[in-house]
């Protein structure tokens, strides 16, 4: 063959190497031709988009570029901008407020020495979520940790004795045992009834008793040691505080010197600007150096203030505890007497007044003596209640063995948004599943209630529900009870999310082929078994993206709790602005908060997309 | 008995059963903390610092009460409250005292079952306008756009004022001071109206405070004071006389600097002696010890010191004493005699 | 040998309530009903006890008291001497206004950006993606506040229009003024108008009085009559087409029928546009679209539009590629393919989630108070509750209003959905 090839002159022996495509058809040019300028319409669109983009960048970039990060107040920001760049406030951002308050925006007023607790909970949350989110790759045993996490997380965040979460979990164990035993003797109904009753009895009666006893035991065992410690705290702390205050005074002196120095420099530089010349680079370096030093000193001052504050707090706690220790014997002696008195007064009340909780409730025509008797009884009853509460709290404070308790009033910022969002979703899942099943059920009345609940919750804005939580929930609870706002909000948000989750899961149930239900029935499984083993695992899997989206929505909606007075990031920004040094800062806080939300919501959204894709593959 | 058992169970089950007890003083002492309702942020009156420590003029009242009752000005739990829930929180026992610049009105004192224990700041609703508008009186504001920081009484006062003067206006209600400030500075409204103290505080933070004037008209009386529950007179007396002690201390020249020294031994002024417990037993009459007023004054200083430190002329807010000067200086601040 | 016999008939046994499926469902429902009714009764009893303990009662009488506060945007007559009920009504109308406007704009934005995100143009699809992700992932409250602030900072204040050399000037031949207090646009006025009819119901509904412009009624009536005539003409044209195969040209007749009477009527009424003019502190005359309305409208639309864009994108993607190819094979052009083949199928996927977006938008309009837009939550649920201390009644009424509104919207949209739904047999 080669011979012929050589002899035939007009046949090429070798291939010509492919020539480069024309300039218009390669590289960036080709890409642009295809993707940006493929027709006049496209070209126009591209040009408009580029114009918009450039406009936006020109408006925003200098503001970010010239931002000031080291300043103690908005006025110093303005000063820095004016002397360094010759700009007004609008010329550059004052992100110094973020560097001053970012911890507050993240954690609210959570005690700084305990920041590790929310951080640990945050990390553990991912560990707990991992077996659910990435079910294929992780061992099933990790699910046990996921089930423990809510109790562990709650304990870490709020603190208290280590046995409290264990006691709560034991309630579930009691419930489960009740369920088993009831199931053996009285069928499904007995199982549910005994399970619920057992758990309720445990939590309402046994747990408080055991908890109180444990606290009391611990308290009594170390009461003398505690007393000594407290007295020592009272003795040593004032001196320490004095020392810190002296140091603070020295730092303040230094700050004043630096400020004076800075002021002189500012005047010089502004004068230079006035005269039309740029301040010399030496001056600028000097200014920056002073500002840096000033910030260091200020941070030092704040840190000292914090230590002093903590020492002072220790003193007040010690004072309070010592007073409690002293009062305890008296209280314990008074309690039986008070109970006796109240019981006698109750017995002496005329018929029909025994169950009233306020003198306003007496029926018309009651004699004034009876009303007085009722009032006296109510006061006595309150006194008993308070004595009990006092003794209880005293022992609890003395006998806490675990983490320092933190009240939910101190929760705030991004952490609060996380807590409300996560608690809302986690608690609403079981309720949502039940509601979805009820809505699918073949029981008209139950179905009717489920539909009514879901539609009423979904038909009213969250903000109205939050108002209900903050203003009205106290009306719906037994008289003279109230509980803390964060808990009330979590309950309301849970109910709210449950309605949405129910709809998501209903979608998942509807997407399941009917054959699955029929197959479960034909295997002879009863309703709960078929749901638990066949239907729900599949339906929940399909619903995960929807659940994640509901969570994102809920998480964003947590900004609304600011309207009812909780210190979410947005409301906290108002508190920060109330400080004289940051009054007037506007956009910087919003940018920071917006960025926080964007990053977390965007990544969750990506996860849900990834999951959707994966699930789609799984079904094919 | 059923009630207390059930409530006790609820309390331990995690739901705090709060009960408005017959004696707030006993509650506070047992708790070792004073629960004090404040605004979540009002410059000079109540604001948290970078460490989360609350500061301000209203906050100082709570600290003084805590010092008098518990001997410790830091033994206060501050509860930020919104306008709507403040009275509910007080009535339900969630807080012991409300120091959240609340105007003393007839219906609040009677119908809402509250007790105002005095006035710690005499305020009034005022107007701020840019100087360039050339407005010198609120009556020139016909047709103006007014930014209002919404509250319970501001809208009503505004509506009444303009109606009474038969001039028209366009209200722009804004929830927070920050937004109102931003709107005003951008010129979206000609006038900003809220309590005069708030106006001064806001103006102080402007880039050019001199370009704005606060008009002479004060269109309402806003006596702001701490509030306690109606019915517990013992507790009300303690709060009231702590505030009065701060006021009397200024009048008598007792300051946080010299209170130690003055209380060490009886002085020549019998009223100071009675106030500081070196003579008589006023403290015992309100269920406290003799040194109660000394601690209250030492906590942050007398009324004048608190004023100067938090909102006075040398602070960024720069409020003059005005109506809030002692009666001896032509103001309205006046403590009944300690005897 | 055993013989198969029927099991002996037994009377009803109690255990059948649990073990017999016929009775079990009844048992469950009875138990559920008892539990729920008991819970509701418990709540109601607590509420009554708490109210009496506080010395309060449950009454709506406060709605008849003088409100004492002013509202800037009112679609019906209102001043501070009117009642709280009237203020609530003003708020309700404001909510309906912003929700209605928002739904329309959100749909438009959503469709545009949903299609743009599928565009082959790289930069356009990227920008659309940035818009969608940016709005979806940041809380709405933040957007509302930010857009309101941007609108006030980027537009001139009325002061800037004043003076010899004003910094700002009016747009569209001095007809429109865009200020940071809102946009002032010309309003239609009638030189020889026919006045208003006052509608004044009595009794409980005394607060529902309002005025209806006779001019508006006459114009609407004329329009309806014209449209009916047009319909008649078209029916006739169709008949002719069916009979002869040739359709007579009707468009100019139709145009004439619609335009001529209206034009004549407007001329007769002395129609003119009232321009906004600078006077005193503000512009006067014209219609004032307040910034709070514009910002809320824009924020709600942009936020919901981002969600709708995703729905639209999903809907279009859900139509299988074969449909496009089939349409092309039939010789349809891309435009017609979109209109006749893709969109009708995509709509079936799009509409159900679109309904819930409309519901969300309506409910989200309750954030209006953040920028001072006086919706029902700000008037009835805000200032009125604050003034009267009637939080139980106020919040319940607000909740009830939103519930009814949501139910109305979802009923209406579901009816529409049923009509466009694929009818499967």
Image (cartoon, helix red, strand yellow):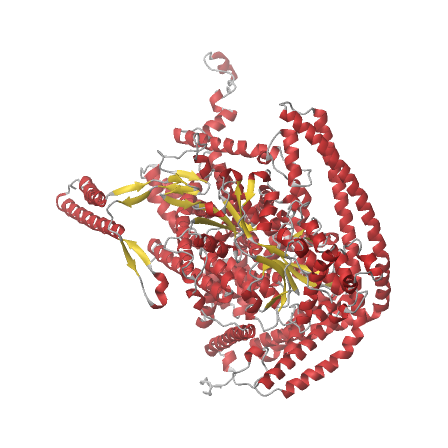
Is there any visible trace of residue A184 in the rendered image? Answer: yes
Q: Quadrant of residue B290?
A: bottom right
> What residue sits 51% from the left and 79% below the top?
C19
Q: Position of residue B129 (x, y in %)?
A: 52, 43
Left or right: A348 in relation to A234 = left
Please state which of residues C274 and A109 is positioned toward the viewer in this rendering.
C274
> What residue sits 55% from the left and 57% below the top?
B221
Q: Quadrant of the C terminus of chain B?
A: bottom right
Please state which of residues C160 and C152 is positioned toward the viewer in this rendering.
C160
Please state which of residues A49 and A406 is positioned toward the viewer in this rendering.
A406
Whether residue A429 is situated above or below residue C183 in the rendered picture? below
Is there any visible trace of residue A151 in the rendered image? Answer: no
Q: Quadrant of the N terminus of chain B?
A: bottom right
Whether residue C187 is situated above or below residue C399 in the rendered picture? above
Q: Position of residue C411 (x, y in %)?
A: 38, 59
Numbered label tally:
0
Left or right: C351 in relation to B95 = left
Q: Quadrant of residue B92?
A: bottom right
Left or right: B213 in relation to B327 = left
Q: Position of residue A310 (x, y in %)?
A: 77, 54
Residue at the left extreme, as displayed: C244
Q: Position of residue B53 (x, y in %)?
A: 71, 53
Whether residue C295 is situated above or below residue C387 in the rendered picture? above
Please state which of residues A545 and C8 is positioned toward the viewer in this rendering.
A545
């Amino acid at each position: 063959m080669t011979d012929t090839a050589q002899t035939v002159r007009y046949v090429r022996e070798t291939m010509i190497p492919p020539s480069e495509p024309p300039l218009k058809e390669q590289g960036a040019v080709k890409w642009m031709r295809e993707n940006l300028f493929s027709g006049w319409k496209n070209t126009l669109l591209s040009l408009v988009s580029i114009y918009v983009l450039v406009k936006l960048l020109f408006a925003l970039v200098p503001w970010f570029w010239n931002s000031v990060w080291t300043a103690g107040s908005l006025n110093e920001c303005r000063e820095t901008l004016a002397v360094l760049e010759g700009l007004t406030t609008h010329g550059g951002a004052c992100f110094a407020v973020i560097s001053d308050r970012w911890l507050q925006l993240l954690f609210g007023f959570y005690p700084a020495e305990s920041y590790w607790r929310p951080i640990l909970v945050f990390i553990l949350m991912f560990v707990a979520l991992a077996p659910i989110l990435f079910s294929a790759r992780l061992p099933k045993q990790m699910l046990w940790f996921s089930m423990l996490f809510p109790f562990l997380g709650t304990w870490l965040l709020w603190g208290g004795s280590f046995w409290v979460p264990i006691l709560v979990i034991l309630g579930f164990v009691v419930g489960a045992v009740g369920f088993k035993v009831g199931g053996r003797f009285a069928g499904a109904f007995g199982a549910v009834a005994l399970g619920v009753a057992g758990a309720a009895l445990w939590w309402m009666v046994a747990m408080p008793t055991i908890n109180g006893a444990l606290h009391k035991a611990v308290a009594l065992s170390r009461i003398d040691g505690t007393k000594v410690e407290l007295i020592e705290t009272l003795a040593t702390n004032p001196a320490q505080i004095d020392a810190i205050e002296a140091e603070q005074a020295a730092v303040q002196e230094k700050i004043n010197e630096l400020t004076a120095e800075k002021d002189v420099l500012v005047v010089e530089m502004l004068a230079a600007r006035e005269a039309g010349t740029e301040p010399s680079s030496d001056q600028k370096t000097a200014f920056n150096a002073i500002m840096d030093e000033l910030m260091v000193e200020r941070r030092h001052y704040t840190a000292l203030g914090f230590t002093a504050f903590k020492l002072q707090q220790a003193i007040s706690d010690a004072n309070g505890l010592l007073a409690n220790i002293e009062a305890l014997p008296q209280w314990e002696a008074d309690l039986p007497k008070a109970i006796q008195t109240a019981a006698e007064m109750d017995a002496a009340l005329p018929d029909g007044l025994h169950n009233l909780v306020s003198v306003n409730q007496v029926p018309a025509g009651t004699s004034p003596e009876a009303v007085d008797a009722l009032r006296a009884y109510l006061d006595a009853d309150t006194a008993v209640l308070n004595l009990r509460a006092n003794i209880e709290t005293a022992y609890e404070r003395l006998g806490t063995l675990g983490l320092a308790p933190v009240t939910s009033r101190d929760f705030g910022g991004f952490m609060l948004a996380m807590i409300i969002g996560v608690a809302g979703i986690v608690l609403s899942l079981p309720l949502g599943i039940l509601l979805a099943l009820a809505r699918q059920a073949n029981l008209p009345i139950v179905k009717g209630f489920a539909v009514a609940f879901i539609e009423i919750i979904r038909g009213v804005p969250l903000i109205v529900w939050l108002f209900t939580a903050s203003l009205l929930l106290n009306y719906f609870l037994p008289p003279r009870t109230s509980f803390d706002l964060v808990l009330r909000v979590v309950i309301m948000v849970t109910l709210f999310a449950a309605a949405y989750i129910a709809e998501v899961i209903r979608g998942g149930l509807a997407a399941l082929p009917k054959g699955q239900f029929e197959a479960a029935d034909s295997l002879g499984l009863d309703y709960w078994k078929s749901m638990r083993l066949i239907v729900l695992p599949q339906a929940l899997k399909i619903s995960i993206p929807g659940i994640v989206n509901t969570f994102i929505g809920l998480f964003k909606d947590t900004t609304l709790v600011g309207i009812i007075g909780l210190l979410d990031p947005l409301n906290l920004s108002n508190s920060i602005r109330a400080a004289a040094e940051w009054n007037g800062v506007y956009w910087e806080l919003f940018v920071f908060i917006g960025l926080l939300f964007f990053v977390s919501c965007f990544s969750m959204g990506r996860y849900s997309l990834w999951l959707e894709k994966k699930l789609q593959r799984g079904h094919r | 008995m059923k009630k207390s058992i059930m409530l006790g169970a609820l309390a331990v089950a995690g739901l705090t059963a709060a009960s408005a007890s017959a004696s707030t003083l006993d509650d506070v002492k047992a708790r070792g903390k004073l629960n004090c309702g404040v605004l979540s942020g009002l410059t000079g009156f109540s604001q948290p610092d970078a460490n989360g420590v609350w500061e301000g003029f209203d906050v100082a009242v709570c600290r003084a009460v805590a010092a008098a009752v518990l001997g410790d000005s830091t033994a206060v739990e501050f509860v930020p409250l919104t306008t709507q829930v403040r009275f509910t929180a007080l009535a339900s026992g969630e807080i012991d005292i409300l120091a959240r610049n609340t105007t003393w009105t007839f219906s609040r004192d009677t119908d809402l079952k509250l007790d105002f224990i005095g006035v710690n700041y005499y305020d009034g609703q005022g107007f701020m306008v840019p100087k360039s508008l050339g407005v010198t009186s609120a009556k020139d504001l016909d047709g103006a756009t007014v930014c209002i920081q919404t509250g319970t009484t501001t809208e009503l006062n505004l509506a009444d004022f303009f109606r009474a003067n038969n001039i028209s206006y366009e209200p722009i209600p804004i929830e927070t001071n920050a937004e109102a400030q931003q709107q005003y500075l951008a010129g979206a409204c000609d006038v900003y109206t809220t309590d005069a103290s708030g106006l001064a505080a806001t103006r102080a933070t402007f880039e050019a405070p001199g370009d704005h004037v606060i008009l002479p008209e004060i269109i309402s009386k806003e006596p702001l004071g701490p509030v306690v529950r109606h019915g517990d007179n013992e507790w009300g007396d303690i709060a009231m006389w702590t505030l009065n002690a701060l006021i009397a201390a200024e009048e008598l020249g007792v300051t946080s600097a010299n209170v130690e020294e003055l209380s060490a031994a009886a002085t020549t002024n019998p009223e100071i002696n009675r106030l500081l417990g070196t003579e008589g037993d006023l403290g015992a009459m309100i269920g406290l010890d003799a040194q109660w007023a000394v601690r209250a004054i030492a906590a942050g200083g007398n009324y004048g010191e608190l004023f100067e430190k938090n909102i006075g002329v040398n602070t960024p807010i720069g409020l003059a004493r005005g109506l809030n000067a002692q009666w001896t200086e032509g103001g309205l601040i006046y403590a009944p005699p300690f005897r | 040998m055993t013989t198969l016999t029927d099991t002996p008939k037994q009377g009803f046994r109690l255990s059948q309530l649990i073990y017999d499926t016929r009775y079990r469902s009844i048992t469950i429902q009875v138990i559920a009903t008892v539990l729920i009714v008991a819970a509701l009764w418990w709540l109601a009893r607590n509420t009554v006890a708490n109210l009496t303990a506080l010395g309060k009662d449950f009454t709506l009488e406060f709605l008849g008291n003088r409100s004492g506060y002013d509202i800037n945007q009112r679609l019906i007559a209102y001043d501070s001497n009117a009642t709280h009920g009237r203020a609530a009504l003003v708020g309700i109308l404001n909510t309906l206004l912003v929700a209605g406007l928002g739904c329309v704009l959100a749909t438009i934005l959503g469709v545009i950006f949903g299609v743009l995100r599928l565009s082959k143009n790289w930069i356009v699809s990227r920008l659309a993606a940035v818009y969608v992700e940016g709005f979806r992932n940041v809380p709405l409250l933040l957007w509302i506040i930010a857009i309101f602030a941007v609108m006030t900072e980027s537009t001139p204040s009325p002061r800037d229009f004043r003076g010899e050399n004003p910094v700002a000037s009016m747009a569209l031949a001095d007809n429109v003024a865009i200020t940071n207090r809102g946009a002032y646009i010309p309003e239609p006025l009638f030189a020889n108008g026919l006045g208003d009819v006052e509608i004044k119901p009595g009794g409980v509904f005394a607060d529902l009085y309002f005025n209806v412009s006779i001019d508006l009624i006459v114009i609407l009536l004329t329009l309806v009559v014209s449209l009916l005539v047009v319909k008649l003409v078209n029916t006739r044209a169709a008949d002719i087409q069916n009979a002869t195969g040739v359709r007579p040209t009707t468009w100019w007749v139709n145009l004439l029928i619609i335009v001529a009477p209206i034009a004549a009527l407007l001329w007769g009424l002395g129609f003119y546009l009232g321009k906004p003019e600078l006077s005193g502190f503000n512009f006067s005359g014209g219609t004032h679209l307040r910034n709070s309305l514009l910002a809320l409208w824009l924020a709600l639309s942009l936020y919901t539009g981002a969600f709708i864009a995703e729905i639209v994108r999903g809907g279009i993607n859900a139509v299988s590629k074969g449909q496009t190819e089939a349409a092309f094979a039939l010789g349809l052009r891309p435009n017609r393919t979109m209109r006749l083949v893709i969109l009708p199928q995509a709509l079936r996927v799009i509409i159900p989630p679109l309904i819930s977006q409309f519901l969300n938008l309506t409910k989200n309009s309750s954030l209006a108070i953040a920028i001072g837009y006086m919706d029902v939550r700000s008037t009835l649920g805000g200032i009125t509750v604050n003034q009267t201390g009637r939080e139980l009644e106020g919040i319940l009424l607000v909740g009830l209003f939103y519930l009814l509104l949501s139910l109305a919207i979802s009923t209406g949209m579901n009816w529409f959905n049923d009509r466009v739904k694929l009818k499967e047999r």
